Image (cartoon, rainbow, N blue to C red):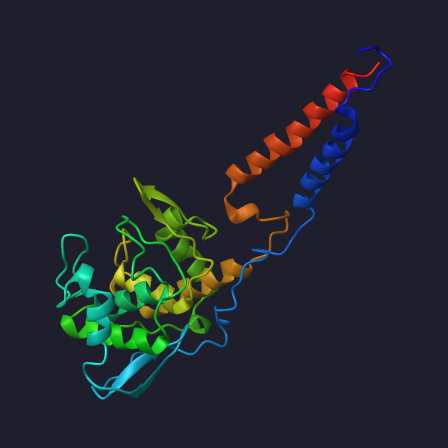
Amino acid sequence: MSRTQTPRFGKWLIPLALLAVASGLAITTGAPAHAGEDNSAVNNPKQSPAAGAPQGSGAKNVYSQNSIHAVPTGPDAGRQLFVQSCSTCHGVSGGGTEVAPPVAGAGAAKADFYLSTGRMPAEGPTKQANRRHPTFSDEQRAEIVQYVASLAKGPPIPPVDPSRGDLVQGNLLYSTNCAACHHATGSGGAVGRDYFAPGLNQATPLQVAEAIRSGPGTMPVFNNGALNDDQVNSIARYVEHLKTADHPGGYSIGSLGPFSEGFIGWIVGLGALLGLARWIGSRD
């Protein structure tokens, strides 16, 4: 190649370098938190009514995202659904099998958490179920939850009202009890071999409270002695705050901290500089 010739990659290297620099600049220009995420299912904490399971054997509890109401039903309405969809793994009486633990004693809180987040029925015999779109309707879920709750005593559906929580207290409680696993920004993280703490960006206030009271998976149980109802309200409010918190420094980049920021810095920033230096050095 003569000294006057332009290298072949010179035609595309400059635009590539400019694109990389522009991408780096865009990261620091600011963007809404969690852009593109669909949080339409999450209620505004100021508008969320307090949730509490009504009593009475002649009604079933129908759960929406953060509220509960009762409709007439028979006492064994959920048994047929449970036998059809759950008994293969958990046993007809909820006592468990070789492939799944018992649900008798899990209580309404844990049953509703797993069903409302789509973790049950499970996709397969994995160690940890992932969040999916719920399989059952609110009415069907309420029937199964009521049946599971009747098998043995367990944590009931907890009352929760984020609007009554204190945001500052929620920040402190979350940092002390939750951030070690779920990350300071609620993005989740690894907690051990094959197990992880899921992100909280899709969790409703009711699901947050249910998880606190029932301890799904590797999560510990926080009973009323560890966290009272007011403290649970404060945590639920803080989790809601995390979903809409501003990022004045730029894009949240998944709220994963130094990992994603370092990736952008090394791959985009340093890569653009090396490419530009290589192009300049290949010229006359």
- The reply to whether residue 231 is in sight is no
Residue 276 point in image, percent of width and height: 74, 25
- The reply to whether residue 260 is in sight is yes
Direction right: furthest residue: 4
Residue 264 falls left or right of residue 125: right
Residue 192 sits in quarter:
top left
Question: Is residue 103 depicted above or below 139 in this figure?
Answer: above
Residue 258 point in image, percent of width and height: 52, 38
Residue 86 point in image, percent of width and height: 22, 65
Q: Nearer the viewer, residue 12 or 68?
A: 12
Image quadrant where one finds the N terminus: top right
Residue 210 point in image, percent of width and height: 32, 66
Question: Is residue 168 depicted above or below 75 in this figure?
Answer: above
- Residue at x-position 42% and y-position 66%: 204
Residue 80 sits in quarter:
bottom left
Image quadrant where one finds the C terminus: top right
